């Protein structure tokens, strides 16, 4: 065995060669809160970004004018690694070059037990059969808060996990929801750099995690059970508003009729929901994740393709991603400032004092916040 190279350069080379272990280590690096690791993670991400913008500009210039560079070698090594004996490719995969920097990010949410992992396993295997490379990232709000997990630490999607054209990552086990979101955004970037052209982000449909996931993916898909009525009443309007596609799962056997009813009810419920896209009307389809080729998994994909075709041709996808990056920049600013604030002992002391005063209603929240920020800035000025 080759000695593994954990330097940032080593990770980048591993990534662009499609090495799943390098990808796993790179994701661990972006998930780390250790300041030294953060610096390395940022370097790695910048190198990826630079490489991608180089590739993008080369694609738009004529090939003849390009002088060979590290990037060309990198592309070559991606191609040659595709034919290595470790990865067995089907014919379609051989024909389909890795679409560097071009990928679809799909969020998948739904209540526990609706069949998320069963769907992802079937859907993922179907995408592989079409020649795609699929990565699956999990966002689990329960693990962020309590260290426990709703998605479960049991090995899920076993067939997909074993396939070398897929990469399944369990949910990060630490951090706040904001931290998990940042990790996930960065993990998506890493997966794309490693050549996974479809990135699925799975989350449990409870709490705020869906909103967060909707903010980092291109398309948000909601999986629902084949019941209507009460179930639909209990469903938060907010999550319907986020959904570009609603999939009624378990549409098989004795459940087909109630799945049909659910489809009708969700379709009419969506009519009263404000559309998020100017070019796409949310759709409701039925599938059976356990129904094999007749289960409608192909219809799920063709509907998603339809969405992406429209979003790409109208330019809305690009605008959406740009907007998301802007949102994340400001979220990042807030969280970094908050970290700095918390590192300042004087500020911490004052904040503790003010917290209890706010609790007793002796000081207004706004005034207290102002004092905290002022103390922080004073500390900054005197230290510089
Ligand atoms: P998750 O908690 O959302 O990930 O749900 P799972 O994928 O673990 O599935 C929960 C249960 O529903 C399991 O017992 C599955 O076998 C079952 N299930 C999932 N998809 C289907 C389906 O399409 N049809 C039927 N009949 N059962 C399904």
Image (tube, grey):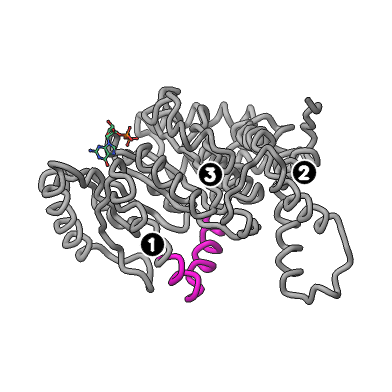
Say whether residue 379 is visible.
no
Q: Are marks 3 and 2 in contact (CB under 8 Å)?
A: no
Taking depth in this image into account, of 171 and 339 the one nearest to the observer is 171
Residue corresponding to mark 2: 13
Q: Secondary structure at mark 2?
A: helix
Tell me if residue 307 comes above or below residue 366 in the rendering: below
- The mark lying in front, picked from 1 and 3, is 1
Taking depth in this image into account, of 139 and 377 the one nearest to the observer is 139
Residue 95, how many percent across, how many down?
A: 62, 59
Per the image, is 311 magenta?
yes
Say whether residue 22 is visible.
yes
Image side of residue 2 versus residue 162, left or right: right
| Label 2, residues with CA under 10 Å away: few <14, some 14-19, many ≥20 | some
Image side of residue 49 versus residue 122, left or right: right
- What type of secondary structure mainly makes up the magenta span? helix
Residue 133, how many percent across, how many down?
A: 56, 49
Image side of residue 325 versus residue 207, left or right: right
Residue corresponding to mark 1: 302
- The mark lying in front, picked from 1 and 2, is 1
| Label 1, residues with CA under 10 Å away: few <14, some 14-19, many ≥20 | few
Q: Earlier in the sequence, mark 1 or mark 3?
A: 3
- The residue lying at 54 percent from left, 49 percent from top is 331
Q: Dividing the image into 4 quarters, which one contains the C terminus?
A: top right
Where's ligand 1: which quadrant?
Answer: top left
């Amino acid at each position: 065995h080759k000695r593994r190279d954990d330097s940032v350069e080593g990770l980048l080379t591993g990534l662009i060669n499609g090495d799943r272990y390098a990808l796993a280590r790179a994701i661990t690096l972006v998930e780390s809160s250790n300041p030294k690791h953060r610096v390395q993670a940022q370097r790695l991400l910048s190198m990826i970004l630079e490489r991608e913008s180089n590739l993008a500009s080369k694609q738009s210039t004529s090939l003849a004018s390009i002088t060979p560079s590290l990037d060309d070698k990198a592309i070559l090594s991606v191609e040659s690694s595709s034919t290595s004996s470790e990865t067995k490719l089907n014919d379609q995969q051989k024909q389909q070059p890795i679409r560097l920097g071009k990928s679809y990010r799909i969020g998948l949410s739904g209540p526990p037990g609706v069949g998320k992992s069963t769907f992802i396993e079937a859907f993922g295997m179907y995408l592989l059969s079409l020649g795609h490379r699929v990565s699956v990232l999990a966002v689990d709000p329960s693990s962020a808060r309590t260290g426990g997990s709703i998605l479960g630490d049991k090995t899920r999607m076993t067939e997909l996990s074993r396939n070398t054209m897929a990469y399944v990552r369990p949910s990060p086990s630490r951090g706040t929801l904001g931290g998990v979101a940042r990790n996930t955004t960065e993990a998506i970037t890493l997966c794309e750099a490693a050549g996974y052209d479809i990135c699925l982000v799975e989350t449990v449909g409870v709490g705020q995690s869906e909103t967060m996931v909707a903010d980092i993916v291109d398309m948000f898909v909601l999986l629902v059970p084949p019941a209507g009525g009460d179930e639909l009443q209990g469903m938060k309007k907010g999550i319907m508003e986020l959904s570009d596609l609603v999939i009624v799962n378990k549409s098989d056997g004795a459940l087909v009729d109630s799945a049909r009813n659910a489809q009708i009810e969700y379709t009419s419920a969506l009519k009263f929901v404000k559309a998020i896209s100017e070019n796409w009307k949310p759709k409701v389809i039925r599938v059976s994740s356990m129904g094999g080729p007749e289960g409608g998994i192909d219809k799920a994909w063709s509907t998603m393709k339809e969405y992406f075709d429209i979003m790409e041709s109208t330019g809305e996808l690009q605008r959406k991603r740009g907007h998301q990056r802007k949102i994340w920049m400001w979220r990042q600013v807030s969280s970094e400032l908050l970290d700095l604030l918390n590192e300042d002992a004087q500020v911490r002391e004052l904040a503790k004092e003010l917290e209890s005063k706010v609790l007793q209603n002796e000081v207004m929240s706004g005034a207290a916040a102002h004092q905290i920020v002022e103390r922080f800035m004073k500390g900054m000025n005197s230290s510089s």
